Image (cartoon, coloured by chain):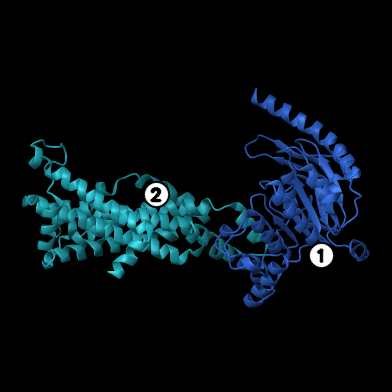
Amino acid sequence: MSAVGNFLKNTTTRRGVAAIVCFVIIWHIGAMFDDWTGVDILGIGLVPPPSDVFAAFLGVIPKVGYWMSWVSSFSRVLTGFLVAMIIGIPFGLLLAVNKYFRGVFFPPFEILRPIPPLAWVPASLIFWPTNEMSIAFVTFLGAFFTIVINVLGGARSIDISYLRAAQSMGASQMDLFWKIVLPGTLPSIFTGAAVGMGITWEVVLAAEMISGGGTQGGGGLGFFIWNSYMGGSLEQIVVGMISIGIAGYICSSTIRKIGYFFMPWRRLF
Amino acid sequence: MANKSSKKKKIGALSIKNVTKIYDPSGVNVKAVDDCSMEIAGGEVCMIVGPSGCGKTTLLNAIAGFHSITEGSIHLDGELLCGPTKPKAEQSAERMVVFQHGALFPWKTLQENVAYGPTVQRVLSANQAMDKAGQMLAEAGLGQFVKKYPGEVSSGMARRAEIVRALINNPKVLLLDEPYRAMDALTKQIMHESLLETYDRTGVTIFFITHDLEEAIFLGDKVHVVTTRPCQLKKTVEVKIPRPRSYATQSSEGFRKLLVEVNDAVHEEAVKAFQAGEREMA
């Protein structure tokens, strides 16, 4: 009890909990409205009430398949995301600091960037040998462009006074890069990561639905929703949606925590 | 104090001779500075006053080595910084700039910021530099704030820390580009006192750009009024108020007289600048 009491002491936490409770109550009222009054509210009249969804949740929790969906979606998201970070950050920084590199690679990058990641799905299903690889590739694309454009923008918008001050104080080109450009770009790197992570989840879900989950078992949460839809289980569809919400929240709060760790000076904002 | 230091051989004498700077990014040919000459003695506080956008900062950028010049030359203690053979001066810690909007690195604490110069120049080990930085910040009255990030302290403290960051490099010249522009009058007073105190202690040459005439007279040994673009020296007013100065001097008759003198010169240029602006708009 005291743990819950402590947990609720923080105003921000209290507000968050209150907001979720209110949301569930409104959802319940909306879902039950036609049972009570006979009037169907357009859009949410057919949504199962929270109690049914909760029951369905309890139903899937012991099932291995549900957790396998989590694992496979997560591993796809993380693979695509990490590869996008590993390639995207240095690529963005190089675009920012080297005009020859920018001259050569920026135009093709800008032509490929507007293509929505989902438009890549059919092509990548054909060109990559396995479903798994094509999903990972599309996921990678989802995060890659966002990360690169954020890193590039962040590095290019570093106040020139910082660079001049550092150079006047005797900084070498290497010092400038590691001590000024990189820390100056960190906030944008993390913004790009947070946005990119969101896009990755969108893309992975859609890719899972389109590709039918893949042949090597584990269909992922996207396939879980699609399967529930095919099976006509409204409650499970909502369970799948909420699962994705929770998964996305875990990812974005992890990125925030890592960001705080690497950018102590941003903690004041 | 001022007398004692004036007997030493002064370093940091700037000689600006017939400097012209033409910006020509795409054939527009804007003359920012036109045949501008000034002599600044070592250890002098030299205040540059002129209308907005007149090319004062261009002159400062040329001394600092951020921009090239088109004609003329600038010497520091007889050594050529830039001239016909070498249009752009090297950036160097002997000429430290304090920027208009402040340029402390937000990702470093005040102490790390101040320690940066000696660390990258490898004149001190990282630990020694941090020690010295802490000591110098304490001398400037910022002892409690050494572990704070620039975003956590007031703009006045940040600016003071930035001046400390410049001074730790033992510069010959301190170049200040309207450093107190966005500050309220009370903070400005404290900044002025702190800068005068620093100056009395170090005797460093100060090249200070400002719009604030009272600031110019209160701080300066000489006030150089420059014309609207292109920047030329219009008038030099010598300020013979003895140091150390206090705020009481601002209400003295001598101070008021100087203010009127400088104001007359500046006002004429401000009107010209305003009319030129109107012409450009029309």
Could you tell me how many numbered marks the image carries?
2
Asked whether, in this view, residue B222 is left or right of residue B123, the answer is right
The residue closer to the viewer here, A70 or A175, is A70
Q: Which percent across, then down, holds residue A160?
A: 60, 52
Secondary element type, mark 1: helix
Q: Which percent across, then down, holds residue B169?
A: 72, 66
The residue closer to the viewer here, A153 or B180, is B180
Residue of label 1: B201
In percent of the image, x 31 and y 45: which residue is there?
Answer: A115
Q: Which mark is residue A109?
A: 2
The residues bearing labels 1 and 2 have C-alpha atoms spaced at a distance of: 56 Å
The vertical placement of B260 against A69, above or below, is above
Q: Are marks 1 and 2 on the same chain?
A: no
Q: Residue furthest top?
A: B282
The residue closer to the viewer here, A201 or B239, is B239
Considering the image in quadrants, where does the N terminus of chain A appear? bottom left
Q: Which mark is residue A239?
A: none
Answer yes or no: is residue A212 visible.
no
* Amino acid on which disc 1 is placed: Arg
The vertical placement of A3 against B221, above or below, is below
Q: Which chain is blue?
A: B
